[in-house]
Amino acid sequence: MSIKINKYSNYKLSNLNWLGNIPLHWILTKNRFGFKKIKNEYNNSDETKVLSLTTNGIKVKNDLTFGKTAISFIGHQLVKSGHIVFTPRDFDQTPILSDVSKFDGCISNLYIVDETKENLFNHYVNYFWYGLKFTVDYFKNFSHGMRYSFNRFQFDEIPLLIPPIKEQKLIVNYLNNKIEQINLSINKILKKIEILEEQQKLLIYNCVTKGLNRNVDMKDSKIECIGTIPKHWLVVRFKYLFTLVGGKDPKNIQCEDGKYPILGSGGEIDRGKKFLYNKKTLLLGRKGTVDRPFIFDGPFWVSDVMYYVVQKTQMTPDYLLYLFTIFPFKKYIYGSTQPSMSRLDYENHFFPVPPPQEQKKNLEYLVKKNISFKKILFSHKKKIELLKELEKVLISETVTGKVKVSEDII
């Protein structure tokens, strides 16, 4: 048996502008005619599996201490294998929509949990809802209220397009196979990206710790994460290379009516001051996301959750950024609820420092190599985007009847 993709021979108007024409023999109805409206039972045991609806479908939640977890799961609605679970709110923010459960368990009462009638295949409905999402972003554009949500009555009014049950199962098998192929292709590309990124890190590490000339004499840097460096290089504390400047409380900085960005957070403005800094610099985290240094070029304000650097030697912020790729953040970060970095830990850390002319050559080499890496990485990431877009088109076109899935007996 093989699968063929064609057009249907006869179509009819759906009377929904965004849906257009639908196959003549398909039924356009509403959710309320597709579900049994089961009377949900509620969990009364601490032994029941706790389920979570994620971007990868319904999963058993093994770590009950992680994330937004209830104190107790007694009273949560029960889910049986085969039930379809739908998230009814926050469609402006969440990519999560629905899934068919493979497990018996319990889940938050915020979800709509139901069972399809005999003429409706649960996995087809799941694909159909994603088809609505990919066709017109239905659940965002047609949702209600500030939370972009559906209550049970509104959920029951969602359009439902029903092919014959045999076609529903053909559609599901076809989409399962195609999506599996797409995911295999994506995983292969992700592996290539992972290898490239490791090669990029190794190249940077070798350049900023060993230099470009492999024939020079080496010495022990006495820095655990660096090892040997060229004999003529220095090992210098960060504070002797750059001055580390803390940002200000956002309530006391001014953004010139939005003309200058506030890096780190927003806040009140004080019109009596000028912008804080207007040179190319490196920004370092003090609280929150502390392990992602970045370069900024132009006038800006920086809040008190960040530092910026002021050049004291011939070393540039661009070169310093590459040095921070070998900075052992995990060694210095403290605090669990809000990861933080101490000024002293930054300032007293040792970096390998080549002579200025060698820094310049290293930087030119790294910039050139990184351009090459970025081109290849961009190409791979673009392929992933196109594959994900193909997946959306396949689902949308198939479940709305724009293409026909049929089988040929060989």
Image (spheres, rainbow, N blue to C red):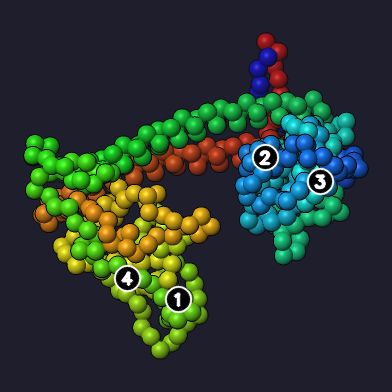
Which tag, 1 or 3, sits closer to the chain's start? Answer: 3
Residue 138, given in percent of the width and then of the height, sits at 71, 51
Q: Within 10 Å of the Cα at label 4, are there few (<14), some (14-19), or many (20+) other Cα atoms?
A: some
| Residue at image mark 2 | 61
Q: Classify mark 1: helix, strand or loop.
A: loop
Q: Within 10 Å of the Cα at label 2, are there few (<14), some (14-19), or many (20+) other Cα atoms?
A: some
Q: Within 10 Å of the Cα at label 3, are there few (<14), some (14-19), or many (20+) other Cα atoms?
A: some
**Which residue appears at 40% of the width and 37% of the height?**
193
Task: Describe residue 333's horizontal placement relative to residue 13 as left or right.
Answer: left
**Amino acid under label 3?**
Ile
Residue 28, given in percent of the width and then of the height, sits at 83, 42
Task: Describe residue 7's horizontal placement relative to residue 277 as left or right.
Answer: right
Q: Residue 74 bears which disc, if any?
A: 3
| Residue at image mark 4 | 245
Spatial distance from mark 1 to mark 3, Cα to Cα?
44 Å
Which one is in front in this view, the residue at disc 3 or the one at disc 4? 3
| Residue at image mark 1 | 249
Quadrant for the C terminus in the image: top right
In the image shown, does 271 or 152 lie closer to the viewer?
271
Task: Describe residue 233's horizontal placement relative to residue 158 as left or right.
Answer: left
Which tag, 4 or 2, sits closer to the chain's start? Answer: 2
Quadrant for the N terminus in the image: top right
Residue 228, given in percent of the width and then of the height, sits at 18, 41
